[in-house]
Image (cartoon, rainbow, N blue to C red):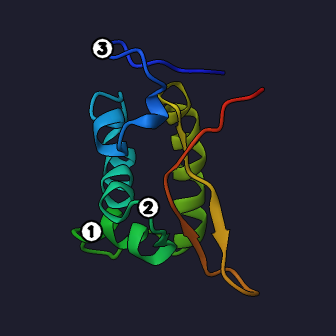
């Protein structure tokens, strides 16, 4: 699926993520995650950093299962970002559950 910019008619993935996603309709927590991912682009962000960004001001420290919380938010975010030509793949680092996420343009299907 090719998603074109309404202004320049180039693929949305040609734009920097901050520009391409500035008008995306996202819930507040997804907006926080996108801000972290945009700030790090094109590098990846550890799951722990995303969790900390979501719950830094929670007096109880947030839920007990940070990896699950972030995974669910990312799953929702993938659906919300697809119309803008972006996705968030998980990057596994070695063995274990220490994942990282990054913004990535969706490749055009041939």
Residues at marks 3 and 2, CA–CA distance in whole angstroms? 24 Å
Residue shown at the point (56%, 31%) measured from the top left = 82
Left or right: 51, with 18 as reference point:
right
10 Å crowding of disc 2: few (<14), some (14-19), many (20+): few
Residue shown at the point (50%, 32%) measured from the top left = 80
Between 11 and 23, the residue placed more toward the observer is 11
Secondary element at tag 1: loop
Residue shown at the point (48%, 35%) measured from the top left = 13
Residue located beneath label 2 in the image: 42
Check the picture and name the quadrant holding the C terminus.
top right
Per the rendering, the mark at residue 7 is: 3
10 Å crowding of disc 3: few (<14), some (14-19), many (20+): few
Residue shown at the point (47%, 18%) measured from the top left = 4
Answer above or below: position of 19 versus 62: above
Dot 1 or dot 2: first in sequence order is: 2
User: In terms of image quadrants, where is residue 36?
Assistant: bottom left
Left or right: 62, with 65 as reference point:
left
Answer above or below: position of 68 versus 108: below
Residues at marks 1 and 3, CA–CA distance in whole angstroms? 40 Å
Between 61 and 67, the residue placed more toward the observer is 67
Dot 1 or dot 3: first in sequence order is: 3
Residue located beneath label 1 in the image: 58
């Amino acid at each position: 699926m090719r998603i074109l910019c309404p202004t320049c008619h180039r693929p949305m993935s040609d734009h920097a993520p901050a520009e391409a996603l500035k008008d995306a309709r996202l819930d507040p927590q997804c907006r926080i995650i996108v801000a972290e991912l945009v700030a790090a682009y094109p590098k990846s962000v550890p799951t722990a950093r995303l969790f900390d960004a979501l719950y830094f001001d929670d007096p109880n420290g947030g839920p007990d299962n940070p990896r699950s919380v972030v995974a669910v938010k990312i799953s929702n975010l993938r659906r919300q970002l697809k119309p803008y030509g972006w996705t968030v793949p998980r990057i596994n680092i070695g063995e274990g559950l220490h994942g990282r996420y990054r913004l990535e343009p969706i490749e055009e299907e041939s």
